[in-house]
Image: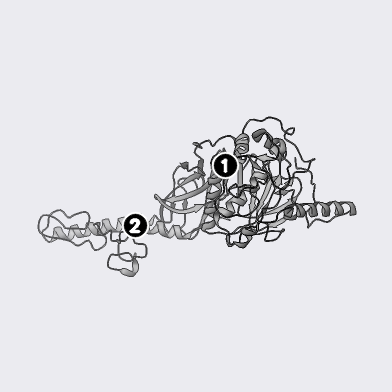
Amino acid sequence: MRLPIRFSATACVISTGLVVAATALASSASTARAAEGLQAPADLVARGLGQSRGMPIPVPADAPRLRAPNDPQFATQGRIFVNFDGAQLVGGFDDSTSDVTQIEECAGNFAAYGGGAKRDATLQAVRDDWAPYDVIITDVRPGSGNYTMCMTGPSNPFGGGVLGIAPLDCDDSQTPNNIVYAFHSADDQFDASTQATTIGQEAAHSYGLEHVDEPGDVMNPYNAGGDPSFTDVCIGVVGGVVCGAQHAAECGSQSSQNSHRELLTLFGPSMPDSQSPTVTITAPDDGDSFDEGATFEILVDASDDVAIDHVVLYNNAEAIETDGSTPYGWTVNNAPAGTYEFYVEALDAAGNVSMSDTVTVTVGGAAADSGGDAADSAADSAADSAADSGGGDGAGDGGEAGTGGGSAEGGAFDDGADGSLPPGYGLDGDDAEGCVCGSAGGGPRPFWAMAIVLLGLAARRRR
């Protein structure tokens, strides 16, 4: 059942002055909360640091509740989806599974983070920060279950001095599917560690952790550089206390917080993920055939108990394409003639790997066989010629003819170490310009390998 809407998105049409006033009040309250009490230390500002991570915004009291406040609970595995790809968000009680946000200013189009190596480095840094806890960090949206989603991108309604903001959900007792925000991009000036600290802090707010006065703790409200962690020390809460009972359970005081112990209580210690994914090629079917130059789809169904990280397509045992987001698959354009043996490997975030069954597909007249037929024909002809000139039995490979001294050069196909191909294929050993598909060892690949390369270049992501 869809959750009731609490805040109207900015783009919505408001029908009554009362709703307009309520929405404006909610918006101004969250804006004020983002900047409340956040005056960075002068020494940080002098070093170009000191940007703030906004004060968390308590979940509305009338939001759906999982359990009564401060009820004991068993530790359960958590999931954080770091969404680098953007989304269209609407206003309401938080529901990450439906892209509904309680922070009304962020409703609308939230831009994507961008590509490049920093994205991968940031994700890994987040995983490192959360490694002590039974929390799965993924950049692939889970297909089911509860998860906190951190929208990570440059859309920032609070100004450049605020690096992130989040709902505050004490003991994670209300909405299990919060949306939090890290206002970073692939092109900003912050390194992967700083970006990961923002992501980790905002996610932790959704579990009831608040700001503390310690630069070495992820929950410090200011960017102090370095590589903070969730520290196993009771530290004073700054900016006001909302989740006091949660803190007192670990520190004996509502005004002190032990970030590490609170996360252990919520999630338990890290548990190894030993379960491998499942993966199947759903199209084409094994044994399918296509005309030469055809276009066809390779479709893949992959799932995991936590999340798939990516899938890799292989053809004749050579990796040719990778897909990191659902739906998994590729379009093959202008397929060369030949026989192809496809299989897919699926990897999860823990590195577990599974391989699909192999699907064999034929395109056109199986050109890979035609080269062999030509070679056999040439060899037979050479053997006959050698026999006519007094030689014995001809060599079937088109090499030396036989015992009678006669010989025949394998004009069509030399099956020697250089792997030369029949004339006309542009890959003969003495044709330097034709060796664009040559092997790493310098020699040309056989024709079937050339077809692999051509297919790999033609494969494109299906979207």
Asked whether residue 234 is in view, the answer is yes
Percent position (x, y) of residue 103? 74, 51
Instruction: Give the residue type at disc 1.
Output: Ile
Q: Nearer the viewer, mark 2 or mark 1?
A: 1
Q: Is residue 362 left or right of residue 19?
A: left
Q: Report the front residue among 419 and 118.
A: 118
Q: Would you call the spot at circle 1 few (<14 residues within 10 Å), some (14-19), or many (20 or more)?
A: many
Q: Would you call the spot at circle 2 few (<14 residues within 10 Å), some (14-19), or many (20 or more)?
A: few
Q: In the picture, residue 418 is in which quadrant?
A: bottom left
Residue wearing tag 2:
370
Instruction: Check disc 1 and report its element: helix, strand or loop.
Output: strand
Give the residue at x 58% y 42%. 231
Percent position (x, y) of residue 99? 69, 49
| Mark 2 and mark 1: Cα distance apart in space | 51 Å
Residue wearing tag 1:
136
Tell me: residue 390, above or below residue 326.
below
Q: Are marks 2 and 1 in contact (CB under 8 Å)?
A: no
Instruction: Check disc 2 and report its element: helix, strand or loop.
Output: helix
Percent position (x, y) of residue 92? 76, 47
Give the position of the N terminus as an image quadrant: top right
Q: Report the front residue among 371 and 389.
A: 371
Instruction: Give the residue type at disc 2.
Output: Ser
Q: Is residue 160 left or right of residue 404?
A: right
Q: Report the front residue among 196 and 137.
A: 196
Give the position of the C terminus as an image quadrant: bottom right
Percent position (x, y) of residue 190? 58, 59
Give the residue at x 70% y 57%. 109
Asked whether residue 142 is in view, the answer is no
Q: Is residue 361 left or right of residue 402?
A: right
Tag shown at residue 86: none
Work out whether mark 2 precedes mark 1 in sequence or the reverse, and give the earlier one: 1
Q: Is residue 224 left or right of residue 384?
A: right
